[in-house]
Image (cartoon, rainbow, N blue to C red):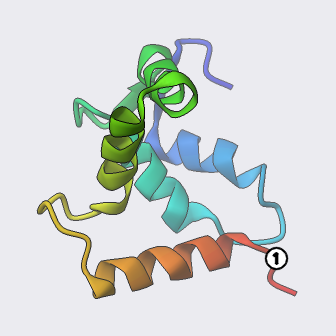
Amino acid sequence: ECPSGVVNEDTFKDIYAQFFPQGDASTYAHFLFNAFDTDHNGSVSFEDFVMGLSILLRGTVQEKLIWAFNLYDINKDGYITKEVHYVLIISVNNGRSQS
């Protein structure tokens, strides 16, 4: 899918959508893309992706909490409001089966 080892957001969404063929996972994929794109350059390199996975799988509790907060702080203002939480819940639900 990405021989250069770098994906843009559209390619990331296409790859992520393959895991949720019955729903629309594009909004949640957008949030995930932003969490993996730590330098905010509009692309996720293989290194960015592996670093994120490393934190999720082998990081300390503190590192995992910081990563998760970064994922859910979608407007990057340092807060997770009820409104933002609602947007996230809807995006997760949309990724599930539409039946």
Q: Residue at x 41, y 28 (%)?
A: 60
Q: Residue at x 22, y 29 (%)?
A: 39
**Vertical arrangement, residue 69 with respect to residue 1, above or below:** below
Between 47 and 67, the residue placed more toward the observer is 67
Is the N terminus in the top left, top right, bottom left or bottom right quadrant?
top right
Identify residue for label 1: 97
Q: Residue furthest left?
A: 77
Provide the secondary structure element on which disc 1 rests: loop
Q: Position of residue 43 (x, y in %)?
A: 37, 32
The quarter of the displayed image where residue 61 is located? top left
Left or right: 99 with respect to 7? right
Is the C terminus in the top left, top right, bottom left or bottom right quadrant?
bottom right
Q: Residue at x 17, y 58 (%)?
A: 76
- The kind of residue on which mark 1 rests is Ser
Characterize the local packing of mark 1: few (<14), some (14-19) or many (20 or more) Cα atoms within 10 angstroms: few
Left or right: 45 with respect to 74? right
Left or right: 11 with respect to 19? left
Q: Position of residue 75 (x, y in %)?
A: 21, 64
Q: Residue at x 14, y 60 (%)?
A: 78
The quarter of the displayed image where residue 9 is located? top left
Left or right: 80 with respect to 49? left
Q: Position of residue 56 (x, y in %)?
A: 52, 34
Number of marks drawn: 1
**Vertical arrangement, residue 2 with respect to residue 64, above or below:** above
Q: Position of residue 88 (x, y in %)?
A: 46, 74
